[in-house]
Image (cartoon, grey):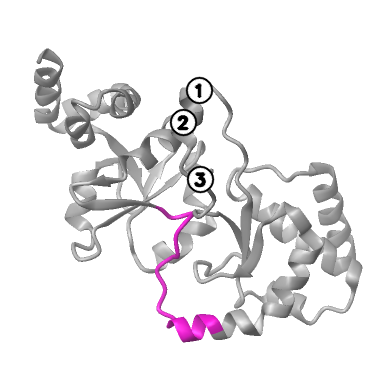
Amino acid sequence: NSTKKILQAIKKLSGEDADTFIEQYNRVMKEGIYIDQVNKELLLDIVKYKSSTEEGLVSFEDYMSRGDSEKKEIYYIVGDDEKVLRNSPHLEAYKKANIEVHIMDDKEVDSIVTPMIGAYKEWSLKDITTIDAPDSKSEEEKEEISKEFKSLTDKIKEVLGEEVKEVKTSTRLTSSPSCVIKDSSDPMAGMAAMFAQMGQEMPEIPLILEINPDHEMIKKLDSLDDKSLFDDLSWILLDSAKLSEGLEPKDKGAFAQRVASLATKAL
């Protein structure tokens, strides 16, 4: 059909012509993946994304040429602010392991389209905010760390209550004290496309708070006797983790007060 011929011609574009076209029509192409199932594969060949390791925009094919051909996984992170995504704690372990991640900063489209793609030429698409990060520790070591900090994670969960589904030790963090992740097992997690079709807002999925057991703040928190200070720091761990993902603290006023209180004590 005529659409297919046009897409095939677009696919043959190279150099500056290809870059100019993609800059103007990338979003339309991504929307097409969702709408046009007949030409979905061709559209997947054309669309491009920003990268955590490369300059400019890269295609899935580009990513695969540099990726692990045994694992066959394409990693990505979705949000609406490129700078926030590039500074996300979720990227720390991938930067350390020199693993490329697609930076998808058109949340309105990417959060719906990317999960429904599922895979590209047998390479699975993986949202790094819902999976375990690359890590050199054995399962036994992880279990040992989890047990060592169980008392602390339980205490933080008690303070935060229903604001988080779970608090656990992290293997993805290298420099940040905490991060929030989505619960991939939540029944709502894969339903963004369905809600978009109905024109409805996606309900909030309960977040999991991960803490970095190697961070100085976490080590000090573990031996802290001051209940009021412990509570404040627990909330700051959650709220600062949310902010680093472009999310807002539930109570911005309380967050500001806690930070001001800590700053005063530090003087």
Seen at 73% across and 46% down, the residue is 249
Where is residue 9 drawn, in percent x and y? Answer: 9, 23
Q: Which quadrant holds residue 143?
A: bottom right
Instruction: Note whether residue 165 is visible.
Output: yes
Q: Quadrant of the C terminus?
A: bottom right
Q: Which residue occupies 20% across, 51% down?
A: 122
What type is the residue that disc 2 sits on? Met
CA–CA distance in space, label 3 to label 1: 16 Å
| Residue 167, numbered circle | none
Q: Which mark is residue 189?
A: 3
Is the Cβ of the residue at disc 1 closer than 8 Å to that at disc 2?
yes
Callout 3: 10 Å neighbours few (<14), some, many (20+)? some
**Label 2 vs label 3: CA separation?**
11 Å
Q: Amino acid at mark 1?
A: Met
User: Can you say whether 192 is above or below 63 in the image?
Assistant: above
Badge 1 marks a residue whose secondary structure is loop
Residue at image x 42%, y 73%? 135
Q: What SS does tag 3 mark?
A: loop
How far across and how far down the image is residue 77, in percent?
43, 48
Is 131 in the magenta? yes
Task: Using a 10 Å C-alpha cutoff, classify the residue at mark 2 as few (fewer than 14 neighbours), some (14 to 19) or many (20 or more).
Answer: few
What's drawn in magenta, residue-wise? 127-143
Q: Main secondary structure of the magenta part?
A: loop
Determine the residue located farthest toward the top in the rendered image. Answer: 2
Give the number of the disc on residue 198: 1
Kind of residue at disc 3: Ala
Whether label 3 touches label 1, CB < 8 Å? no
Q: Position of residue 35 (x, y in %)?
A: 31, 23
